[in-house]
Amino acid sequence: MALVFPREVSPNLSLSFPPCTGPHAHRQQMSNSSSITQFLLLAFTDTRELQLLHFWLFLGIYLAALLGNGLIITTIAWDQHLHTPMYFFLLNLSLLDLGSISTIVPRSMANSLWNTRVISFQGCTAQLFLFIFLITAEYCLLTIMSYDRYVAICKPLHYGTLLGSRACVHMAAAAWATGFLTALLHTANTFSLPLCKGNALDQFFCEIPQILKLSCSHSYLREAGLLVISVCLAFGCFVFIVLSYVQIFRAVLRIPSEQGRHKAFSTCLPHLAVVSLFLCTGVFADLKPSSISSPSLDLVVSVLYSVVPPAVNPLIYSMRNQELKDALRKLMAGLFYEAHQMSVNLYENKN
């Protein structure tokens, strides 16, 4: 695959900036950043055949994510037996997965199909905001889901009290609100910086570190401060998840019957697998050693943490969850029965 990573500037932009010196330097920098009307995203390849291959590959992944998450959302909403805290949080997780992959993949597909790299300034702002919003909310929700599993296994007698319908709604709303507030702060702060180092991003979607590389101001330290706070919160959530699962595994190993242990593990392992996939890909993308970093590796890793999890999560949850599989079979059987009845009625009406 011929990878291309030029730091070219769109021909219709005038980005030749004078040196930022003197008492009016900051004012000049601010006016320079306002002249950027579009960004150039990283191209996967410059070969037309490979661009089309990228389009079809991403289309397949995107349709799989839409189908898998859509079936989970529909099944949980349709089956009354799945109106429990665990499946309520799973429904929210599927909504977040659908949103996050829809924020990135369609734009990348369109760029490959039309052989372009351009994204507007407003489009980049919206993409950055939505991606941070949905990813942060998903991480918070995964933390809440670990608490749900902890209460269900370690404190089953208090499950209805600690995780009533109102408490579940409040916790889910807190996850969404945390994501929204985090995204608002990061987006507002990132795009308030003067940008005077071109308009080409070394990423196939708009991402904070790549935009900060274009800044010509030392005020990026404010964004670094926000990132440190976000990392601390993320680490706190990680510690909470680890401690929850330590308690869960201790409780499960004390269950006398093998069937009871299997049932407990079957409800925990899918969530643990999703958390591991989410964290491992994200941490590797951010903390991989610079000695092994390369443009092609960075591109593959960014796809792994931004595109693959939303498509794989429904498969992980449906593989070991018998209740969800049974409800899905009932839903599909009901849909086929209704379609059959409709066709029979149409045939009888014609005759």
Image (cartoon, helix red, strand yellow):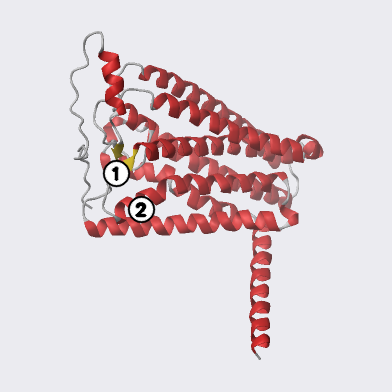
8 sits left or right of 209 in the view: left
Q: Residue at x 35, y 33 (%)?
A: 288
Q: Amino acid at mark 1?
A: Val
Q: Is residue 317 above or below residue 127?
A: below
Q: Is residue 188 above or below residue 110?
A: above
Q: Secondary structure at mark 2?
A: helix
> For the C terminus, which image quadrant?
bottom right
314 sits left or right of 210 in the view: right
**Where in the figure is residue 101, as x and y percent of width and height?**
46, 47
Q: Nearer the viewer, mark 2 or mark 1?
A: 1
Q: Residue at x 76, y 36 (%)?
A: 155
User: Which of 248 and 29 lies nearest the eye of the viewer?
Assistant: 29
Q: Is residue 44 above or below residue 131?
A: below
The image quadrant of residue 330 is bottom right
Tell me, yes or no, if residue 124 can be seen here: yes
Residue on which the image places disc 2: 109
User: Which of 106 and 291 lies nearest the eye of the viewer?
Assistant: 106
**Where in the figure is residue 1, as x and y percent of width and height?**
23, 53
Tell me, yes or no, if residue 320 can be seen here: no
Q: Amino acid at mark 2?
A: Met
Residue on which the image places disc 1: 118
Label 2 – label 1 distance at C-alpha: 12 Å
